[in-house]
Image: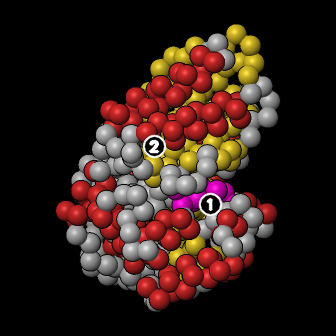
Amino acid sequence: MNRPRLLVIGGFLGAGKTTALLRLAKMYHDEGKVVGLITNDQAAHLVDTGVVRFHGFRVEEVAGACFCCKFDELAQAADRLRAEAGPDVLIAEPVGSCTDLAATVIAPLKALHGDRFSVAPYSVLLDPERARQIILEKGFGGFSSKVAYIFQKQLEEADVIGLNKVDLLGPSARKRILDALEAEFPRATVIATSGATGEGFGAWQELLEGEGSASARVVDVDYDRYAEGEAELGWLNLVLDVHAPSPFDPDLLVKGIVERMSELIAERGAEAAHVKVLFESGARSAMANYVGGSAPARLSLSGSVPSAEGKLTVNARVHMDPDALRSVAWNAALEALRDRGARETLEASFHFRPGRPVPTHRYAAARAEPGQP
């Protein structure tokens, strides 16, 4: 059986990881390689899983906690893909609010499963607006210092730091942020990337295929501070079955819900890490997203064909009380559906604050040999 290259690609919520990972997967696919993806969330019903399936890639979802706390499930998911699809490349996307992955995911993968998977250097992507707020301005990006701490620690442990969405930056702003990242994180290779345009992806792919450290950057993490930072984020996964008397435009539906949610979140003085809304109807899907701050809601996947029924999934990670977040999402969704004469049936709803991370393994050095934690 083959020994696929396993790419773990992290980054804070709203960094554009899913768009970037799909572009990367397509690059490998176009080279004739078989690609599988593993998504990860604190609860089931992840928008990203549906989007990956829409693009035709084999995908496994690890739900209930981050890869670090569900390490055995991650390994099992990778083994299933390896057995069923025979992939050349596996791409794993951890929860965006998690850190310490060099010690709790990369190192154990190498030490315990290195005979089955070739582990690539660890990449972390970041959004330019958060980078400006936290790295350049030394602020908290609209969050608390504890949430910003998670953002910083993600970058400290990266082999490769990708400043993503650089298509949204002018030349001077891009240079300032890249220079600041190189100065603050000198051990990492810093690159500019755009999941939307593909800029920088050739260089990134070369780094992923190289014989880099595959993360030797185990960092000290204050788990009390880390846990408190994660717990400040309200988490929501909401799924509705939708039926309308006549077809409507899915693009307008998802974008309208995201825009209304962004308004309601702002009215409460809260900061969104990310909001994603997906509508699936047959072989068609539409998705819109919002990453907080001054960024507008964006339509990132077009449904194009009017539909009268389908499944609506809302994922939101916001710096606010989970009950209030559910109310925001519920009201925004129902308002948009009522405008179209549609009715909904609740399929699933999870709203909570993430619990304290309890890693399955934590290695003192990412280059540990098998059996030497």
According to the picture, the residue beneath numbered tag 2 turns out to be 266
Q: Is residue 146 left or right of residue 343?
A: left
**Nearer to us in this view, 278 or 288:** 288
Counting other residues with Cα less than 10 Å from the Cα at mark 2, is it few (<14), some (14-19), or many (20 or more)? Answer: some
Question: Callout 1: 10 Å neighbours few (<14), some, many (20+)?
Answer: some
The residue beneath circle 1 is 21
Mark 2 or mark 1: whose residue is earlier in sequence:
1
Task: Assign a secondary structure to mark 2.
Answer: helix
Q: Nearer the viewer, mark 2 or mark 1?
A: 2
Rendered residue at 53%/65% (across/down): 129
Instruction: Give the amino acid at mark 1.
Output: Leu
Q: Position of residue 33 (x, y in %)?
A: 72, 64
- Residue at mark 2 to residue at mark 1: CA–CA distance: 29 Å
User: Is 37 part of what is drawn in magenta?
Assistant: no
The reply to whether the C-beta atoms of the residues labelled 2 and 1 are less than 8 Å apart is no
As shown in the figure, which amino acid type bears the numbered disc 2? Answer: Ala
The part of the chain drawn in magenta is 14-25
Residue 37 coordinates in the image, percent (x, y): 58, 55
Note whether residue 351 is visible.
no
Q: In front: 125, or 104?
A: 125
Quadrant of the drawing holding the N terminus: bottom right
Q: Quadrant of residue 99?
A: bottom left
Rendered image: mark on residue 246:
none
